[in-house]
């Protein structure tokens, strides 16, 4: 399994998360797991103004899941 972690705001989860200094963030924007034989699973993250995670959305794999953090 290969995992890519992206800190670039607005980068497509299907892309390579190319470096962009103007859009680089301190918080994780998304992660993508390339699963051999079964495609990709991505998790996108949303943060509040204090850089705390408020939501995670997982897509791909057997089912999609959304988590909310309060």
Image (tube, rainbow, N blue to C red):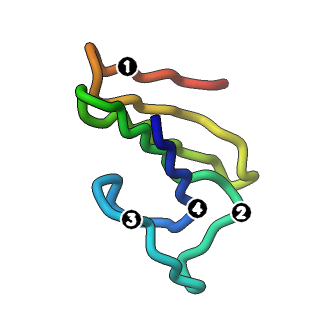
> Which residue is rendered at x = 45% and y = 75% of the image?
18
Write down the residue under mark 3.
Answer: 16
Earlier in the chain: of badge 1 and badge 4, it is 4
| Relative to 54, residue 13 above or below | below
x, y (%) of residue 24? 60, 73
Q: Secondary structure at mark 2?
A: loop
> Which residue is rendered at x = 71% and y = 51% of the image?
51
Image check: 60 left or right of 45?
A: left
* Tag 4–tag 3 contact (CB < 8 Å): no
- Looking at the image, which is closer to me, 10 or 37? 37
Quadrant position of the C terminus in the picture = top right
Q: Secondary structure at mark 3?
A: loop
Image check: 28 left or right of 43?
A: right
Write down the residue under mark 4.
Answer: 7
Earlier in the chain: of badge 2 and badge 1, it is 2
Distance of label 1 from label 4 (alpha carbons): 21 Å
Which marked residue is nearer to the observer: mark 4 or mark 3?
A: 3
Which marked residue is nearer to the observer: mark 1 or mark 3?
A: 3
Write down the residue under mark 1.
Answer: 65
* Tag 4–tag 2 contact (CB < 8 Å): yes
x, y (%) of residue 8? 52, 67
Which marked residue is nearer to the observer: mark 3 or mark 2?
A: 3
| Relative to 19, residue 49 above or below | above
Mark 1, other Cα within 10 Å: few <14 / some 14–19 / many ≥20: few
Tell me the quarter of the picture where residue 35 sits: top left
Write down the residue under mark 2.
Answer: 26
């Amino acid at each position: 399994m290969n995992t890519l972690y992206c800190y670039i705001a607005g980068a497509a989860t299907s892309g390579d998360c190319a470096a962009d200094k103007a859009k680089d963030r301190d918080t994780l924007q998304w992660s993508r797991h390339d699963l051999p034989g079964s495609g990709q699973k991505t998790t996108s993250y949303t943060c509040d103004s204090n850089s705390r995670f408020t939501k995670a959305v997982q897509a791909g794999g057997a089912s999609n899941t959304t988590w909310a953090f309060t």
